[in-house]
Image (cartoon, grey):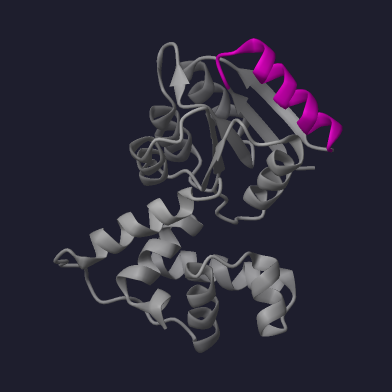
């Protein structure tokens, strides 16, 4: 069972999310409403997935994202927010969030987003992914003094290119006639070689190296 931390300061929303997750077969390790408590609990319990709101009474969700990933870099974080403002989305992704879902999403869309996040996919409410890719393209156009990139295998490069195009692991597996597990292994190997932490960082790397345009 995938273990999930829920962070939201509205008790009714928080309890409803936790209930939907439990009904869908997830293990909710905790449901908390404050930033400091979220970092403390998440660092201790180390869930695979954290669902984080951006507006909290004692801090921001961006601070929670940074704190959780500092303690557990492999944690996969999905933001659940009422805001669809460009700066909020970019701040969350730059902090390390894997995806961003607006709270107006329906239950089925929400559960699908959690499932894909747990698998390592970057999930965004329709229209928001373009904001993130646009920002990464802008950053990629800036001068860079990065050291030479590690050598990736032909297959790892192929998978990375499709990740950058926004395909899910399932779609990549079908496109390359591979198993879902094999695709995940290639992504994990690539993350290790490039010293990156999540799929969003992979997309940025691919754009910076021109792979997304091939």
Location of residue 121 (image quadrant): bottom right
Q: Quadrant of the C terminus?
A: bottom left
Q: Residue furthest bottom?
A: 154
Location of residue 48 (image quadrant): top right
Q: Position of residue 80 (x, y in %)?
A: 56, 32
Q: Is residue 78 above or below residue 213?
A: above
- Specify whether 106 is left or right of 9: right
- Specify whether 32 is left or right of 150: right
Q: Position of residue 177 (x, y in %)?
A: 72, 84
User: Is residue 137 visible from the viewing direction of this image?
Assistant: yes
Q: Is residue 98 above or below residue 186?
A: above
User: Is residue 197 visible from the viewing direction of this image?
Assistant: no
- Specify whether 146 is left or right of 24: left
**Residue at (71% x, 26% y) in the render:** 17
**Residue at (85% x, 31% y) in the render:** 23
Q: Range of the magenta residues?
A: 8-24
The answer to which of 67 and 176 lies nearer the viewer is 176
Q: Position of residue 95 (x, y in %)?
A: 38, 41
The answer to which of 197 and 201 lies nearer the viewer is 201
- Specify whether 99 is left or right of 118: left
Location of residue 4 (image quadrant): top right
């Amino acid at each position: 069972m995938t273990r999930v931390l829920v962070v939201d300061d509205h008790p009714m929303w928080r309890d409803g999310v936790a209930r939907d997750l439990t009904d869908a077969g997830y293990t909710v390790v905790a449901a908390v409403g404050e930033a400091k408590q979220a970092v403390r609990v998440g660092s201790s319990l180390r869930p695979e997935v954290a669902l984080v709101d951006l507006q909290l009474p004692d801090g921001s969700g961006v601070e929670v994202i940074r704190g959780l990933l500092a303690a557990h870099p492999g944690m996969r974080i999905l933001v659940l927010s009422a805001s669809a403002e460009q700066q909020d989305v970019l701040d969350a992704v730059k902090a390390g969030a894997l995806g961003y879902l607006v709270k107006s999403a329906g239950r089925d869309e929400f559960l699908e987003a959690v499932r894909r996040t747990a698998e390592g996919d970057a999930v965004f409410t329709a229209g928001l992914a373009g904001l993130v890719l646009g920002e990464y393209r802008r950053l990629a156009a800036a001068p860079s003094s990065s050291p030479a990139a590690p050598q990736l295998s032909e297959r790892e490069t192929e998978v990375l290119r499709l990740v950058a195009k926004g395909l899910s692991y399932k779609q990549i597996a079908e496109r390359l006639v591979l198993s879902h597990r094999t695709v995940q292994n290639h992504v994990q190997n690539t993350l290790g070689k490039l010293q990156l932490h999540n799929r969003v960082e992979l997309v940025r790397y691919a754009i910076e190296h021109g792979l997304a345009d091939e």
